Every structure is written in C-alpha cells, then in structure tokens.
Image (cartoon, rainbow, N blue to C red):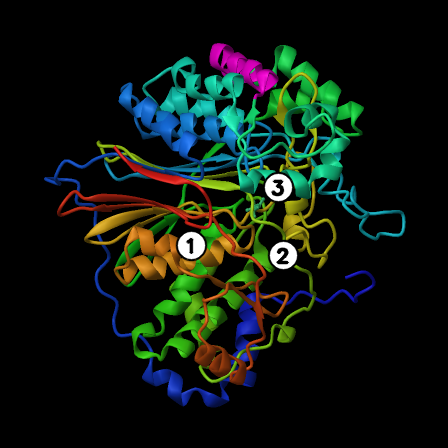
Amino acid sequence: MKGAPRRRRIPGALITGVLVLAWGAAQADVAAVRAPAQPAPATARSAARPIHKSAIASAHPLASAAGREILAQGGNAFDAAVAVSAALAVVEPSSSGLGGGGFYLLRRADGSATLVDAREKAPQAATRDMYLDAAGQPIADASTDGPRAAGIPGEPAAFEYLARKYGRLPLKTSLAPAIRLAREGFPMYARLQSGIRYKRGNLLHSPAAAKVFLTQGGEPPQIGAMIKQPDLADTLQALAERGAAGFYAGRVARDLVAGVRAGGGIWTLADLAAYRVVERKPVTGEYHGARIVSAPPPSSGGVALLDALNILSGFDLGNFDPATRKHVIIESMRRAFRDRAVYLGDPDFVSVPVALITSRAYAAGQGASIRVDKAMPSDLLPGVDAPPGGMQTTHFSILDSAGNAVAATISINLWLGSGYMVDKTGVLLNDTMDDFSAKPDQPNAFGLVGGSANAIAPQKRPLSSMTPTFVTTKDGMMIVGSPGGSFIISMVLLATLNYVDGMSAADIVKYPHYHQQYLPDVVDYESGALTPEEITVLQAKGQKLKEGRRAWGNMQVVTWDFASGAVQAASDPRGEGAGLVY
Ligand code: DON
C-alpha cells in the first residue's frame, strides 16, 4: 500500500443510505427470500437436564490430556482451562504461550457468562508511529519481528485470575502437567516443525529460542525429537508458587525486561507491574432462535459475528440455491468486516458503537444493500490489497459435568510470535503489536485495515479477531472458536450457521471455509468449499474468488445436547488436536 492515497472515512449509516439508493435497483427478488418471523430465542433450561460427561477439544492431544488430568483431580472447567492453556504454551509454542494473551469466555453452571480479557497491552513507551520511518512509511517487519513487536503479555495474569475467582484448585495443581511437559519434553511434530522452518531466520537471532527450537546445526529438530524447556518450566514453577507475581514481578520480570531491552524492545518493570486482566460483559445476540454469546471489544470477533448474523437474519438462507446462499453469506462478511475496520478498537480508549452495530435496525440497513444477483465491489468503500498471514493461535473448548464451560482463544499472533525468546525465562514473545493499525489504511499481516480507533497508544490493547463463542439453541449448546487471524470470524460464522442447521461437531470442524473481509475485495476459499457450479454462479454475480493454497483454521468444538445429555468433542482434522469426552 506504499504511496496509496488515503481515503476519507464515511460513517456506516451514511454509507448504508447511499448504497441503498445506488444499489437497490434489483431488490424485487430479495423480498421473496426475506426471512420469516424469527422463532422465540432459546432460554436457559438448567433444571432437570440429564447428567452429562465432561469434554475438552484442544489443538494438541497432550493439552487435552492435561485438562482431563485436572478434571479428574476435582477441578472444574476453569481449572482445566488453566491447565490446557499452560500445556499449550509448552507443546504448541507456535500458537500461544506465557508471552502472549487472549480471551477466555466463561459460562457458569447457572448459564451466566462473562469474559476474561487477557489481551496484550502496548507498553507505556509505545507511540502511534513507532513502526513508521521518518517519511511516514511502514518499516518492513518492524511490528512482527523481535522484541519491539511484543505487547505486555496477559496470559499469566489470566491463570491467577481464573484460578482464584472461578477455579477450585491452586495453581500449583493446575500448572503441574505443563511443568512436567516442559521439563520432560514432548515429541516434535510436523506442523510445529514447519513453523520453526518458516521462522528459522528469526529464531537464529534469538539464542534462547535457537537452543530450544533448533539443533546445534541450526536446523529444525527431527519429527519425534524430544523438546525440553527447562527455563519455561522454571517460569511456570514461579507462577505456580507466587501466582501472577511470579511473572510480573521479581526475578522473572527483571529477566524479561532485561532481555526485551537487550533485543531493542521498550518494556519496563512498571509495564509488567501494571498489567491487569479485565473482566468484560460478552456481546450477545440471537440468530433464528439461537442465542449467541461471544467476545466483546477489544476483540472484533463477537461484534462482527453478530453483525453478520443479524444481516443474515433478514434472509431465508434455506430458500436459496447453494451458490446464492454462499453469495449472501459472503456479502454479510463484507459488511461486517467493513464495520470492523472503521469502528472497532480498545473500548478503554475509543468509544465503540457496539449497540448500534449489533442492532437489528442497523443490520436491516446493511441487508438492504445486498443484491442476490451481484457482489458489491468493496471499492464502493476504501481499497487496499495484501495477502493474509499464517494459521497460528489456538483455541480450546471445555465443558465440565456441572455445566461450566470455557471457550478460550489465546495467541502470540504469528508463527512462534516475534520469534524472540527471552533468555533464562523460556518465554517466547508475541508480535501482537501488529494487530494495531500502524498507519491508517495500511494492511497488517492479515490484510486488515483500520483507522484511529485501532491506532497504537500506550497501554492500549490491539484489536483482535479472536471469537470464542457459545451458541445456545433450545436443544443444546456449542462451544466454538479457532485460530486464523481475520478468517476466525468467518469460520465461527459458518460454524454457527452449521450448528443451527443441525450439523454434528465432527462435521462442523471439518467444513471447508470461505471468507470475505471487505478489503482486499476477494473471497478466499479452501479447496472443496465451492463446487464448480457454485464458482461459476458466484463469478457471474461478480464475486472475485481466490482458492487458497493451504487449508486454514484449527477449530475446536464441544457440543452438548440438553435432552439426552450427550456431549461431543471434535478437533479440526486440519490439525493434530484431540477431542476427549471424559
Ligand atoms: O488477535 C488476533 O486477531 C490475531 N492476533 C490472531 C492471530 C491468529 O489467529 C494467527 N493465526 N493464524
């Protein structure tokens, strides 16, 4: 986007109005497929439900097993969430860890929900233009590589918060499986090996990371080689003994700050000492009788999901041929992502019009601009182009036998985060600062654009797409989420539509994805997501289609059928995770 003209921002309501006028010529056929009246929403039916089993779906079998071990010791879903997160920090270091953060969506057994926001924060010394050169142009890789790309981590603070406020077990117990895995090691597997190969250049610049993730000859370890992380075990041990203070103060904090600054970063001890998780009210909505509970800002996930679902509520998707159904879903994505780019940011810093964007009236305006015969060019709105990034981050879903549930999506952003491990701590730093908008209309690693709402500021949380979600119908509940950067929102949208249509957990996780994120004006799709006939129809409607070279996503789903008590745990076959019913 270097040198591209900056476009003027136009309020969404205004855009909707203009578009309806300019775009509304072929609306007669739309009326025929507007949705019938919505059925009544599902209500909590906690009374007299059959006893059910516990279930865990996570991206690695050893992490699912860590969660099961904690449930077996009398822990609840929240204790298991700590155990699974910590185990993932060890065995899936490409995707999340103590050096990162994320969102924990919690459901208590009484049906009430809350969200623990453990998103990374910009350090106090961060500035709006810190990734731009003197000419105001983005410095290549500055927001993705090395310690300057790292926000202040939130995951360790979430461990103590979850254990103390919601769990039953001390951190000493729930962190024990992860400490064991870090000390004794886990076997290298293909996906991690390819992540290491991809990030090898960065890892070679970080002696601590190279020691763990590369052989002496500087190559990725063989499949099956045991990866031991004694420094990480010590840091986890400090957390187990001292809670969050074991990370944000004392020896570990001093080592973190010294290591970050030695690598050119800007963290201070005060930044670490000031970090707190924030408990926030989830965003909620309804879609054809299903109740949706999802992550609020500073994730854009829940808002964009509801925005799209509300738009789709205005159509009767069941009445369309398959290609037109996909076309309309794509058009809902286009509009939801446009709102994301314009309005969303950290609510502690900018005023986000959540109520407006998630309202039915707003969606009706958005829906009115959708033509079933023709794609709306995103060019009617501002224009940029960039490829999406990799498929990292991690999600897990847990349900315990009391009905407590956790949907957690946690991350260090791109493959192995910034690629920088701080000496003596075993902590691999995130590169989540790239989720900020470094410059208006400058696409980030996922091709996402944003404006001032998501500009960098000290202590601010970068906007996320992570979408841990509960979908509850009158018959049951789904706990869902995935990695995939901007694609997460589309994947959770498709999963929600599929669950409401009665699809099983196993089919939901393997469903082939398609995605439109407003800018670039392209529909990315996985092989098999569109049939040849659908491709012809969608192209005729003006959709610009691009088949991805790889599969994307690593969705983890737990479902619970209220009437029978049956639970299912399904892990995306694109990864090597495990769904366990216990
Ligand atoms: O919070 C976000 O939206 C990103 N940091 C998520 C990154 C991600 O999912 C990477 N996986 N492909």
Q: Please tell me whether mark 3 or mark 2 is closer to you in this view.
A: 3
Q: Secondary structure at mark 3?
A: helix
The magenta segment: 228-245
Q: Is residue 213 visible?
A: yes
- In the displayed structure, would residue 242 be above or below residue 330? above
The amino acid pointed to by label 3 is Gly
Cα gap from disc 2 to disc 1, whole angstroms = 17 Å
Q: CA distance from mark 3 to mark 2?
A: 16 Å
Please determine whether, in this image, residue 90 is positioned above or below residue 520: above
**Residue at 44% across, 45% down:** 295
**Residue at point 63% right, 15% down?**
252
**Side of 70 where 188 appears, left or right:** right
| Disc 3 to disc 1, C-alpha distance | 24 Å
The x and y percentages for residue 461 are 60, 39
Q: Main secondary structure of the magenta part?
A: helix
Residue type pointed to by label 2: Pro
Whichever of callouts 3 and 2 sits on the residue coming sooner in the sequence is: 3
Label 2 sits on residue: 388
Quadrant housing the N terminus: bottom right
Give residue 195's mark.
Answer: 3
Label 3: how many Cα within 10 Å (few below 14, some 14–19, many 20+): many
Instruction: Kindly give the residue lying farthest to the left in the view shown.
Output: 48
Q: Quadrant of residue 271?
A: top right
Which of the two labelled residues, at mark 3 and mark 1, occupies the earlier sequence position?
3
